[in-house]
C-alpha cells in the first residue's frame, strides 16, 4: 500500500514543546473547566444562522461531534456537516480545496499542506484542543504479553523488517503469524505512528503494507478482538470505548519502565505516545462568518470541560491552551493571524 505520509521531520520536537505548553498551568483532570464559553451570538446579539463544514480526523471526531451537538441545540439555525476523512484526507480533499471551514487533525499540519493552503489563498488557524495517549492493543487472550517497547513496535511495523511471526521479534512470544490492524494512510494517527515509532526506512514505503487499515477506529478494536494473535493501535478514546474487548499494552522506550496508557500519563508526558490534537480554521471564512466565529469560541471553551476526559477519553485543554486558542481566534477575525510551526 503506497503511503501518503509527508509529515514534517521536526514534528516530534514540536510535539514535545506542545506537551510542555499543555502542561503549563494545567488544572487537574477532575477540575479543568475553563472560563465561560462564548455567548453563541454574534455582535449585537443577533440570531446565528448558516452552515459549518468540518472535515478531518477520526481521532478528534468524538470531541467535535459532542461540541457541534451542543452548539446546534442552542442555535437551531446553524447546521453542521461533520465528517471523518482522516487528518491528511481532510486537508488534501476538503480543506485545502476550500470546501470546509475547519479541519480536525491528530497531528500538526505539514509544511507541504501549509504551502498548498497558502497557494490556494488559505491561511490555516491552529487551535490546540486536547491530548491523546495513542494506545497499542492486543487480543484479550494474548497472555504472553502485557507490555511492549517502541523498539519492538518498530520491528513489527517497519517495512525493512516486517516479521511474519511473533517469535521473530521476541523468542518468548508464540510461533504464530501477526494479524495487524491500524488506521488508513489518510489518517493523522497513521502519520504520527510512522514518525514516532517507525521513523525513516530503507524501503520505498513508510509502513508494512500487510495490515488492515481503516478510518473507523472502532473497527480496529473489533478486528483485534477477533484474533488471538492480532495487534493494533488506536486513539485512547476508542480503547476506552472497547475496554472489555481488547487489552491495552504498557509502553517502554529506550530501556525505561513500561507506562500504562492513561490521561494522567499523557498529560505529564511520561507516556511515550502522548500526542496533541488540533483543529485548523480557514481564516478567510472565519472573517466572513459570524456564526463560525461564535462556534469556534464555543469549541475552544468546551474542549477544556471535564467531559472531554470523563465521557470521551482525552486530556482536556489547559487554561493556557484556551487562552492561546482565543488569541489565535481574535487575530484571525482581525485578519492578522499567520501560522508558524
Image (cartoon, rainbow, N blue to C red):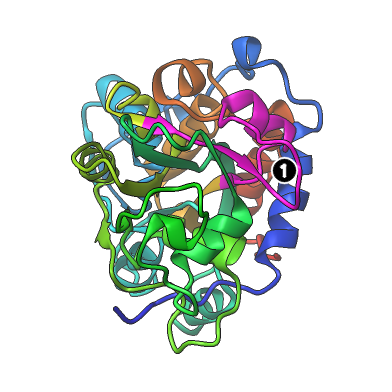
Q: Is residue 117 left or right of residue 63?
A: right
Query: In the picture, which quadrant includes the N terminus?
Result: bottom left
* Magenta part of the chain: 247-276
Q: Which residue is mark 1?
A: 19
Q: Residue at coordinates 22% horizontally, 43% vertically from top-left?
A: 227
Q: Nearer the viewer, residue 279 or 165?
A: 165
Secondary element at image label 1: helix
Q: Residue at coordinates 50% horizontally, 75% vertically from top-left?
A: 113
* Whether residue 43 can be seen here: no
- Residue 165 position (above or below residue 270): below
Q: Is residue 338 left or right of residue 294?
A: right
Residue 240 x %, y % = 39, 25
Residue 270 sits in which quadrant?
Answer: top right
Q: Residue at coordinates 27% horizontally, 54% vertically from top-left?
A: 215
* Whether residue 249 can be seen here: yes
Q: Nearer the viewer, residue 149 or 98?
A: 149
Q: Residues within 10 Å of mark 1 (few under 14, many from 20)?
A: some
- Residue 116 position (above or below residue 221): below
Q: Residue at coordinates 46% horizontally, 63% vertically from top-left?
A: 168
Magenta stretch encompasses residue 242 = no
- Residue 81 position (above or below residue 78): below
Magenta stretch encompasses residue 261 = yes
Q: Nearer the viewer, residue 53 or 240?
A: 240
Q: Is residue 124 left or right of residue 47?
A: right
Amino acid at each position: 500500500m503506497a503511503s501518503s505520509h509527508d509529515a514534517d521531520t521536526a514534528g516530534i520536537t514540536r510535539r514535545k514543546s506542545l506537551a510542555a505548553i499543555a502542561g503549563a498551568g494545567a488544572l487537574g483532570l477532575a477540575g479543568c473547566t475553563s472560563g465561560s464559553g462564548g455567548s453563541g451570538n454574534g455582535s449585537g446579539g443577533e440570531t446565528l444562522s448558516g452552515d459549518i463544514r468540518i472535515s478531518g480526523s477520526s481521532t478528534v471526531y468524538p470531541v467535535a461531534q459532542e461540541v457541534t451537538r451542543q452548539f446546534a441545540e442552542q442555535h437551531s439555525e446553524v447546521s453542521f456537516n461533520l465528517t471523518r476523512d482522516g487528518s491528511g484526507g481532510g486537508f488534501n480533499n476538503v480543506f485545502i480545496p476550500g470546501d470546509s471551514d475547519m479541519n480536525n487533525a491528530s497531528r500538526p499540519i505539514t509544511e507541504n499542506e501549509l504551502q498548498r493552503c497558502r497557494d490556494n489563498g488559505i491561511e490555516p488557524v491552529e487551535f490546540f484542543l486536547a491530548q491523546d495517549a495513542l494506545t497499542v492493543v492486543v487480543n484479550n487472550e494474548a497472555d504472553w504479553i502485557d507490555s511492549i517497547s517502541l523498539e519492538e513496535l518498530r520491528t513489527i511495523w517497519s517495512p525493512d523488517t516486517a516479521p511474519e511471526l511473533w517469535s521473530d521479534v521476541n523468542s518468548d512470544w508464540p510461533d504464530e503469524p501477526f494479524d495487524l490492524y491500524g488506521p488508513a494512510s489518510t489518517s493523522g494517527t497513521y502519520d504520527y505512528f510512522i514518525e514516532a515509532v517507525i521513523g525513516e526506512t530503507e524501503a520505498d514505503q513508510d509502513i508494512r503494507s500487510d495490515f488492515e487499515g481503516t478510518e473507523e477506529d472502532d473497527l480496529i478494536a473489533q478486528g483485534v478482538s477477533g484474533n488471538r494473535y492480532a495487534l493494533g493501535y488506536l486513539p485512547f478514546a476508542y480503547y476506552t470505548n472497547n475496554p472489555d474487548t481488547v487489552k491495552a499494552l504498557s509502553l517502554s522506550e529506550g530501556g525505561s519502565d513500561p507506562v500504562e496508557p492513561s490521561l494522567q500519563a499523557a498529560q505529564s508526558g511520561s507516556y511515550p505516545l502522548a500526542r496533541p490534537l488540533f483543529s485548523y480554521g480557514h481564516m478567510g471564512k472565519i472573517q466572513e462568518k459570524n456564526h463560525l466565529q461564535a462556534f469556534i469560541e464555543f469549541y475552544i471553551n468546551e474542549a477544556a470541560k471535564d467531559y472531554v476526559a470523563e465521557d470521551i477519553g482525552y486530556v482536556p485543554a489547559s487554561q493556557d491552551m484556551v487562552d492561546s486558542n482565543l488569541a489565535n481566534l481574535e487575530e484571525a477575525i482581525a485578519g492578522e493571524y499567520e501560522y508558524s510551526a
